[in-house]
Every structure is written in C-alpha cells, then in structure tokens.
Amino acid sequence: MKSKNTKLGIKIMNRTLIAFSFLSLLVTSESFASNSDLNSAFKKHYKAYQSAVKSGDKESIIKSAKQAYEIGQQFYGEHDINTINLAINYANALDNKNPDKLALLESNLKIIETHHKDNLKTTFDVTLPIAKITFDENSRAALNSLKEIAQKAEEQKDYEFASVAYHEAIKLAVRKSKTVPVARKLIRRNDEINKAHLPEISVQRLTSDMWVASLDEARNRKKAAINRLEHVVKVFDQNLDFDHPFELTAHSKLVGLYEKSGQSDKATKHCLAIAEMVPWKDNQEQEPLYRAHPEYPSNMARRMKSGWVKLQFTISKSGFVKDIEVMDSSEEGFEKASVEALEQWRYAPKFENGEPVEAVSTVQLDYKISRG
C-alpha cells in the first residue's frame, strides 16, 4: 500500500439519503394516558421493523413496516411528518413493480405538498422513488421533479443537498440515450455548484469530477479530461491514507488517455499506481489497462477469413509489453497485425515484496468477419 499524507480534519463527506428514517418515539405523558394501547402497539411494530431492517429479512421488513405505518396513521395522524416517514419506510420495502408502492408514494406526496411543502428533504425522499418507477414511461417529468428540488435547494443555499438531488437526476438521465443531453447539462450545473461550494474531497464533488472527465473524453477533449482526472488523483494523494475506487478508476482512465495522446511515459506512473493499489493474487491473469485493436489484414478481409492468434509476451516493470512471440495461429496472415497491436498495450506490472517485477503472460486475439 502506498504512503500518503493525510490532511488533518479533511474527510470524505459521504451524504447518503437513507430511505427509512428512524422516528422519535417520544410522546407526552398525556398521550400515554389517553392512548396507551395504541402507543404500545406502535412501539411493538416499529421495534419489529427496526429489527427486521438489521436482519435483512425482506418479508419481515414489509410486514412490520406496513403494520407500523397503519398504526402510525392512527397514533400520529394521517398528515403528521412521522406518518409520512413511516409511509416511506413501507414504500421502500416494496418492489418497484408492486402497484401499491407507487400509489402509496403519490398519496403521501400530495400530503407533503399540502401540509409540509417547505420540507424539501422529505419531498425528495418521496419524489426520488416515484421518479425511478415512472422514468421509463415519462422520463421528462421524472427528471424535472428532481431538477426542481435541486434548484430549490440551491435557492435555500443548501448546496450539498442540491448536489445530491442533481446526482440522482443524472443517474436516471444517463439510462436512456434520449435523455443523455439532459444528463450533460445537469452534470455541468452540478459541477459548477460543487466547485463553488463543496470541499474537493467530498464524494459528491469527486463523482462530479469523474462525470465531467467522461464528458470531455467523449467530446475528444483529452487534455481537459486528463487535467480533471489528475486533479482527482492529486486530491486522494494529498488528503487520504487509504485507497478508493474513484482513485483506481482515475488512474485507469489516465493510462488510456495518455496512450491515446501518444504520451506513454506519463501513463507509466499510473500503471505503477494501480499495481500498488490492487493486491496481487496467485495465478492471477494480468488484464490490460489499455489495448489497441489490431487492424484487420486486408488480404484476410478480401478472402472473408476469420481466425485467431495466440501470443506470449513479457510485461515489463513499467507495464510495457515486450518480447512478443507467436505461439500459434489459425492463419499466418493475422500474425503481423496481432504483434503490432500488442506492442501498444499497457498493463499494471506484477508486484512482489512491494516492488514491480517482470512477468510472462499470454493472450489470444480473435478475428471475426461478418458474412451477412
């Protein structure tokens, strides 16, 4: 594991919106006196719900959540915020295909809009599952509902929550090709908020960094993508003493971007960083971080030939490929193109006792031509 300098007081701010809310069960002594049986029944079923959540028993979660909600309606009243939270618990326990879930959420959203319109986070807790359920049929409405919440959070200067709402909208938008343009706009807006108001080590901002880098890469803005990903790596190096999946992904993407930009020397440090981060396992096959696809030999294409080539090679201490040998092939005409492509591949080198070492590996490249 590599050594990093940790900045005191800086940590990942991982804001997770939990679907269920633990309710305050404190009621007045007068309530106990006048409604003790209902209070006892509610506490019994809510405690059962909490236990079911801890155990992960799906059937018990649904049963106890429903019972707590139904008794909670009587105990707190239909319009009380605690009752709405109980409804959220019950709804989130149900499968998205269950029609009762959507009906329950929509009825409670109406109550929120009438009685708790200023409670933005509870609105979000109900709106998000509705958006997920209805997205395939009405993606525009689903995204607009989440976008409106994000914009209201901005107006209230709750930028962390705004980022969370944008984040969820983006996750939905990228699911369909027709809403990808919407996702791009949301990503850019979310990035503006994060850079202006959130610490660079927050999960929301790092997620935004990764999304923006992907956008830049898709638009062939390699330099911009590289700069953003190098920033992500720098944030982790300077602030954290543990590895994170975002860091691994950033290193991996940088290898590909530097290779595509003809900067193999700059890709090397990222190959080494990945090798240090990922524990080596016995009999582990090394997977390429970057691969160049071979050009289909024109003489083989004219003859409508498909085939394969099996090669053996050495992965250097820097993750380069060398000493390539053709072990076998279906057609000699595929061999040259295979070697030329493999020469451009990059790997994370094998590590032994904390140091990179050379390792021998093999790969088979397949060539298939369409006949129809």
Image (cartoon, rainbow, N blue to C red):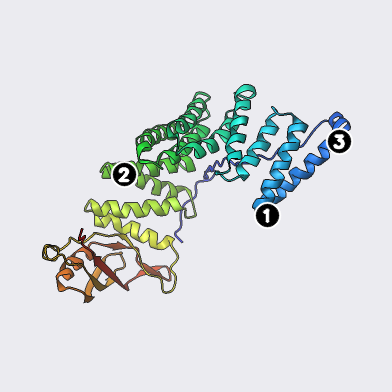
Decide which of 259, 58 is in the foreground and name it: 58
For the point 54% across and 43% down, which residue is it? Answer: 14
In the rendered image, residue 356, in percent from the top left (x then y), is placed at 36, 68
Separation of disc 3 and disc 2 at Cα? 62 Å
Residue ID at (66%, 33%): 84
Q: Position of residue 115 (x, y in %)?
A: 65, 23
Q: What residue does disc 2 label?
A: 225
> Secondary structure under badge 2?
helix
Q: Residue drawn at (67%, 46%), measured in percent from left and top?
A: 62
Q: Position of residue 161 (x, y in %)?
A: 53, 33
Q: Which residue is mark 3?
A: 36
Tag 3 secondary structure: helix
Determine crowd level at label 3: few under 14, some 14-19, many 20+ residues with C-alpha closer than 10 A: some
Which is more foreground, mark 2 or mark 1? 1
Q: Quadrant of residue 196?
A: top left
Q: Which residue is mark 1?
A: 55
Q: Say left or right for 65 vs 242.
A: right
**Nearer to me, 331 or 260:** 331
123 vs 237, nearest the viewer: 123
For discs 3 and 2, the disc positioned in front in the rendered view:
3
Three-letter amino acid code of the residue under disc 1? Ser
Q: Please, what is the three-letter code of the amino acid marked with disc 3?
A: Ser
Q: Is residue 36 visible?
A: yes
Q: What residue appears at the point 31 percent right and 55 percent down from the top-left corner?
A: 255
Q: CA distance from mark 2 to mark 1?
A: 43 Å
333 left or right of 86 in image: left
Marks 3/2 in contact by CB < 8 Å: the verdict is: no
Image height check: is 348 above or below 179?
Answer: below
Q: Quadrant of the C terminus?
A: bottom left
Q: Under tag 1, what secondary structure?
A: helix
